[in-house]
Image (cartoon, rainbow, N blue to C red):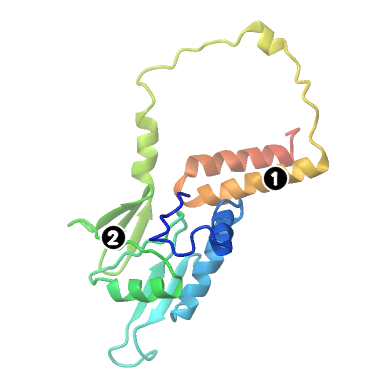
Amino acid sequence: MTPLPTSVHLQFLTHLWHLQKAIYGLKDSGFIFEGHWNRALMEAGWMKSGVLGLWWKWTGKPGAAGSQLIGLCATFVDDLAILGISVSPSTLIAEIACKGPFTIKETHPTDEGKVRWAGVDFELKKDEIRISQSEYLQSLGASVPEGSVPSTPLPLNSRDRHDTSPPLSPPEAKQFRLLLGGLAWVAWDSRPDLAEACNKLSRSVAYPTE
């Protein structure tokens, strides 16, 4: 987190500035940010739906003529992005940014109604939003050279070497599981490869003999 100049950040080097910088570096910063935006959205009149990350709001009195039910899909990628379907969400952005306070960038879809944000592809239609990571997953395979991968055996001394590292103590094992869970939570939205690796490692830690 780069310190802002004093002329820009009026609280530079104050107690609050140090506190904000410390919170940003915590392993639980994702949970702190999620709780903060939940509070801000509720103060702006949004309601949680039964779908994770999806919020509802009436533009006027619920059920009244001319009042519309609008939705907001909030995805954690260290920032908050808002996509508008058929209309500009500038008014909603200003309202939510004021409640945060947040710095929010308004994204504009292409002529085909597509937007990419932190490796996540959003396809906007008249009455739906499709979210996928197909292009991101395909880009992972593009870095692998074509043809068969040559088999390179490990040196004999490395295969015969026994693992002599001491087992983790109970507090160290708990700390490892906490760090692994935090990484899996952050990677859940934008890094499916890391999320899958965390899941496999978690199963291995829970059942090492299987």
Q: How far across and down, in percent of the image, does residue 61 sit?
A: 37, 91
Q: How far across and down, in percent of the image, does residue 89 sit?
A: 29, 71
Residue named by callout 1: 177
Instruction: Quadrant for residue 168, please give it.
Output: top right
| SS category of the residue bearing label 2 | loop
Q: Residue at x 45, y 78 (%)?
A: 46
Q: How far across and down, in percent of the image, does residue 34 sit?
A: 53, 63
Instruction: Quadrant for residue 172, please give it.
Output: top right
Q: Is 59 located above or below residue 53 in the figure?
A: below
Q: How far across and down, in percent of the image, does residue 53 sit?
A: 48, 65
The residue nearer to you, when weighing 15 against 66, is: 15
Q: Residue at x 36, y 18 (%)?
A: 147
Q: Earlier in the sequence, mark 1 or mark 2?
A: 2
Inter-mark Cα distance, 1 to 2: 37 Å
The quadrant the C terminus occupies is top right
Q: Is 91 located above or below residue 143 in the figure?
A: below
Mark 2 is on which residue type?
Answer: Thr
Instruction: Quadrant for residue 156, please give it.
Output: top right
In the picture, measured across the screen, residue 100 lies left or right of residue 111, that is right
Q: Is 193 located above or below residue 39 in the figure?
A: above
Residue named by callout 2: 107
Mark 1 is on which residue type?
Answer: Arg
The answer to whether one can see residue 175 in this image is yes
The answer to whether one can see residue 50 in this image is no
| SS category of the residue bearing label 1 | helix
Q: Is 51 located above or below residue 169 in the figure?
A: below
Q: How many marks?
A: 2
Count neighbours of disc 2 (C-alpha within 10 A) and say few if under 14, some if 14 to 19, many if 20 or more: some
Q: Residue at x 58, y 46 (%)?
A: 183
